[in-house]
Image (tube, grey):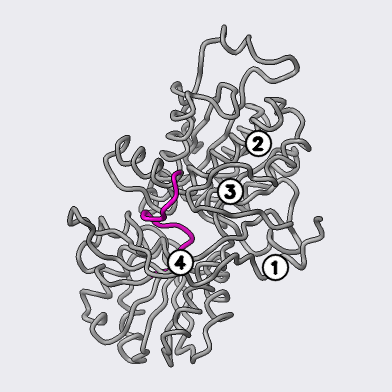
Amino acid sequence: MKARTIVSTAALVAAALAGAAPAQAADKVKIGLVSTLSGPSSALGVDIRDAFLLAVKMNGGKLGGLPAEVLVGDDQFKPDVGRQVAEKYVKLDKVNFLTGFVFSNIMLASVPVAFEAKTIYVSPNAAPSPLAGKQCNPYFFVASWPNDAYHEAAGQHATDKGYKSVYLIAPNYQAGKDSLEGFKRFYKGKVANEVYTQLGQLDYSAELAQLRATKPEAVYIFLPGGMGINFIKQFVGAGLSKDMQLITPGFSSDQDIIRAVGDSMLGTVDAAHWALDLDNAANRKFVAAFEKEYGRLPSVYASQGYDAAQMIDAAVRDVKGKVENVEALRTALKAARFASVRGGFRLNRNQYPIQNYYLRVVAKDSQGRLVNKTIGTIFKDRGDAYVQDCPMK
């Protein structure tokens, strides 16, 4: 079954205005956004989509001064469906950019279609280690963070806290493997166990029984979306939160998880490159606009979808709308001349970010809402562990 394609009519402007575009510039820019929009993990893709479309709306329906046509498709959490939709957008719809994938396994199955056609993919989330190192690609740009990075920061935090034993859990796919490798790279204590679960698993009774028997000082999980929601509910419900500290990457304690789990999240610490309370003008504008538009607070995924749109906006602007000049677009994207909601960052030569990573805690804000609050900086100007293997200059 093919994913349904939706054309965002809000992103189109009148043909008469398009006709006024500068000489040699395109009359519009076309974006193919493919994300997980159904199933237990759909909240992640929905946040990416909503924030991307919000950025386009806030830019008057344009990106880089050109009318923007955004095609939105659901990968249904299936690699084969993701590839089918990507292939349609690249080969039939002739999009100028592809974006949107949440999960690394779906993205890795799909982006070769873009690379073969020399279509640029701007990642609002998945950024696996293979594409950071030897397989780095000139048409792959990351608007989020390397798959290992949150986990490296969490590992450093666990080391700083002096936890002597930590139990590790992640789903069995590329990002899951990257996550635990990243944690172990900076954690200096004992790994009590390293468990890989089925991707999409929602029942963790077996893992919780193992945790109870092993009795680590802390537990680190990489379980995005519905997986994390179910695990944390079951972990707290089993009373294990009284006996061991739960540490998560930022997205496993983010707004979509908080909304589903509730007060049990209070006091949970996590590592992330962005937070609601980061004090910069772009972030304040984004958080207020997202809450006004959608009636909910944005998540890390939303911040990345918004920045992906702003990255494209800046690149199209810098090439003066000449989106057919892919090499010029690449140069403009690498410069990343836009105000990111995360504050300052730059792209490394593998086109992955160099940026800060923060320690956050789930607490109540002045309105009594559960939110993440920034309590420290774990890493400053952190790149990734694979860039030295990337042959690009």
Badge 3 vs badge 4, beta-carbon distance below 8 Å: no
Residue at mark 4 to residue at mark 2: CA–CA distance: 28 Å
Mark 4 falls on what kind of element? strand
Mark 2 falls on what kind of element? helix
Q: Which residues are magenta?
A: 270-281
Kind of residue indicated by mark 3: Ser
Could you say where residue 55 lies in the image, as x and y percent from the top left?
47, 35
Q: Quadrant of the C terminus?
A: bottom right
- Chief secondary structure of the magenta span? loop
Residue on which disc 2 sits? 315
Residue on which disc 1 sits? 386
Badge 2 vs badge 1, beta-carbon distance below 8 Å: no
Which mark is first along the chain, 3 or 1? Answer: 3
Asked whether 219 or 345 is in front, the reply is 345
**Which is closer to the viewer, label 2 or label 1?**
2
Which mark is first along the chain, 1 or 2? Answer: 2
Could you say where residue 346 lies in the image, as x and y percent from the top left?
64, 54
